[in-house]
Amino acid sequence: MAPLISIIIPNRNGEATIGLCLEAAYRSSYSPFEVIVVDDCSEDLSVAVIERFPCRLVRLDRHSGAAAARNAGAAESRGEILFFTDADCLLEPEAIAIAAAAVSRHGPDAVVGGTYTPEPYDADFFSRFQSVFIHYSETKHTDAADYAAGHAMVIAARAFRRSGGFSEGFLPVAEDVEFSHRLRRAGHRIVIEPRLRIRHVFGFSLYRSLRNAAFKSMYWTVYSIRNRDVFADSGTASTELKANLAFCFAVSVLLLVAATSGNVLFLYLTALPVAANVTVGRGLIAAFFKGGGAVFGVAATAYYLFVFPLAVGAGVLAGVVRHLIPSRCLQKGG
């Protein structure tokens, strides 16, 4: 018999997307499955939307975060396999069947991760950029991935309970990365199944795209410093993105020197880091063109090379400051 799969969805003020999420889940071609939605003290009409569906609703008595919500959903689950996703994610109809097959193929000690579809739910430029960027970054290393993202993480229920679940006192993002790293240290293998896809609802504008990049980069930097893997090629915190940041900084320095010295040689020299950046990021750039055509590819490449790293750099700087300030306070207190 096919194993029962428990789809676990944390929700916090997801009124705009949770209905779409549940509609997509119930269009699944797989059987049997159950859906558990954990509402993290939403202040909108999320609960009213959730109650229209035949899912199990778990309501937390205080705002506790996505990690606690996922753990609460797992505690209420009956399935042999747990499938974690988010309230702004739309499962493809075959996603659960692909997840079940992947667990069967790789064994109960493997953690299976999925990814976004290259084409998002939204039609805007910045949402497509984000979806292509994440899809490419998360599917580069399939057999020995660094982490499985919480938007599509599949794990045997027994392995999840042995692991202790997600760390609830962790950072507001990257709890799935920390959990994956802890599972790897315990002997689990993280594998990415590129066919296991969800369609994400972004609703990004320029501001929201840059704010998201800065926010995620800040907390990822804090975690990477703690974990001592700042230069690791880790999913969206990829070697390409880190090189992109370094090359953008080099271009900025050369432009500043050219402006202050009046020497146009430094202006011409900016071509070198730009060319190097394009060479390192050629796989992602090719994905932009494949995912949206020539016009989108040119625009996305320009945004990635010259604008996106500014927000990432601001986030990295903020992350370094957040990491250093507590240490200094502790030293003064001691």
Image (cartoon, rainbow, N blue to C red):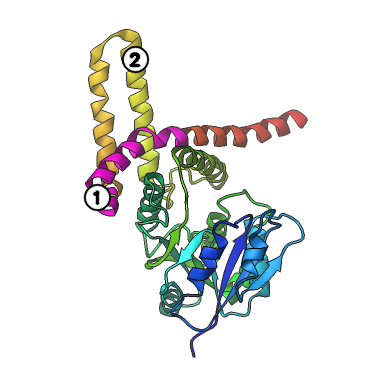
Q: Which mark is residue 293?
A: 1
Q: Which residues are magenta?
A: 288-312
Relative height, residue 93 to residue 134 (above, below): below
Return the residue at label 2.
257
Residue 322, percent from left and from top: 61, 35
Q: In the picture, residue 251 is in which quadrant?
A: top left
Q: In the picture, residue 331 is in which quadrant?
A: top right
Q: Residue at x 45, y 65 (%)?
A: 113
Relative height, residue 270 to residue 46 (above, below): above
Where does the C terminus fall, quadrant-wise?
Answer: top right
Q: Which mark is residue 306?
A: none
Q: Residue at x 56, y 43 (%)?
A: 219
Relative height, residue 100 to residue 327 (above, below): below
> Which one is in front in this view, the residue at disc 2 or the one at disc 1?
1
Crowd rating for badge 1 (residues with CA inside 10 Å; few <14, some 14–19, many 20+): few
Distance, label 2 to label 1, CA atoms, is 36 Å
Q: Secondary structure at mark 2?
A: helix
Label 2 close to label 1 by CB (< 8 Å): no
Q: Secondary structure at mark 1?
A: helix
Give the main secondary structure, helix, strand or loop, of the magenta stretch.
helix
Q: Residue at x 52, y 41 (%)?
A: 221
- The amino acid type found where label 1 is placed reads Gly
